């Protein structure tokens, strides 16, 4: 089984995959509300006490639990992002403590200009990652640049 999601679905795939110890593929997950609150007038309606905790707080609590529990032999997972996405720094920084248990693939595709471009422009990598995880094939360790 491999959990999959893109954008906020990627947030869910990453959260539940990490929490349950399952493999996942997350395409440019939103792991922080900061960018949308600061640059896009809270487009996702996350500020103002609507949610009991921010995504940053949820993942900040989850990551230390995972680093204590998981080993490098546990389920591998893949995060796909792009330095051309405003979510890039949040994804890389949030998941840095788990970099020995994850493959982070960063696309340099020039057609990626914003967050919503990442998922459709990296479908080939998402399918490759899902198939590799399902078939038990090796994936790049830590961080890799992809087209």
Image (spheres, rainbow, N blue to C red):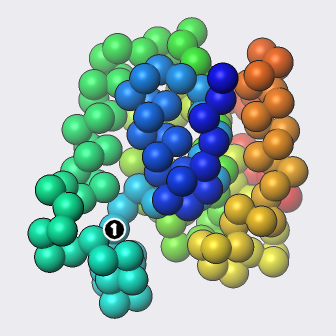
Front residue of 110/14: it is: 14
The image quadrant where one finds the C terminus is: bottom right
Front residue of 49/74: it is: 49
The image quadrant where one finds the N terminus is: top right
Q: Tell me: residue 145, above or below residue 3.
A: below
Q: Where is residue 43, by image quadrant?
A: bottom left
Is residue 117 shown to the viewer in this render?
A: yes
Residue 14 pos. (x, y %): 49, 41
Residue at the (38%, 28%) spot, across then down: 19
Residue at the (36%, 62%) spot, across then down: 32
Is residue 29 shown to the viewer in this render?
A: no
Residue 11 pos. (x, y %): 47, 51
Q: Tell me: residue 133, above or below residue 62.
A: above
Q: Tell me: residue 44, above or below residue 127.
A: below
Q: Where is residue 96, by image quadrant?
A: top left
Please give left or right for residue 104 compared with residue 51 in the image.
right
Q: Label 1 neighbourhood size at 10 Å, few (<14), some (14-19), many (20+)?
A: some
Front residue of 143/48: it is: 48
Q: Tell me: residue 145, above or below residue 71.
A: below
Residue 22 pos. (x, y %): 53, 23
Please give left or right for residue 53 compared with residue 141 in the image.
left
Residue at the (81%, 77%) spot, across then down: 111
Check disc 1 and report the residue beneath it.
33
Q: Where is residue 48, by image quadrant?
A: bottom left
Residue 23 pos. (x, y %): 60, 26
Residue at the (75%, 51%) spot, across then down: 145
The total number of labels drawn is 1
- Looking at the rendered structure, the secondary structure element under dot 1 is loop
């Amino acid at each position: 089984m491999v959990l999959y999601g893109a954008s906020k679905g990627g947030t869910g795939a990453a959260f539940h995959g990490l929490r349950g110890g399952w493999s996942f593929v997350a395409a440019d997950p939103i792991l922080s509300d900061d960018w949308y609150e600061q640059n896009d007038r809270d487009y996702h309606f996350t500020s103002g006490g609507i949610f009991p905790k921010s995504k940053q707080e949820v993942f900040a609590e989850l990551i230390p639990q995972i680093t204590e529990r998981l080993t490098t032999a546990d389920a591998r997972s893949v995060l796909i992002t792009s330095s051309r996405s405003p979510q890039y720094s949040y994804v890389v920084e949030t998941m840095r403590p788990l970099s020995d248990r994850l493959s982070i693939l960063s696309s340099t595709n020039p057609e990626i200009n914003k967050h919503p471009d990442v998922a459709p422009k990296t479908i080939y990598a998402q399918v490759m990652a899902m198939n590799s995880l399902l078939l038990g094939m090796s994936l790049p360790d830590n961080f890799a640049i992809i087209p």
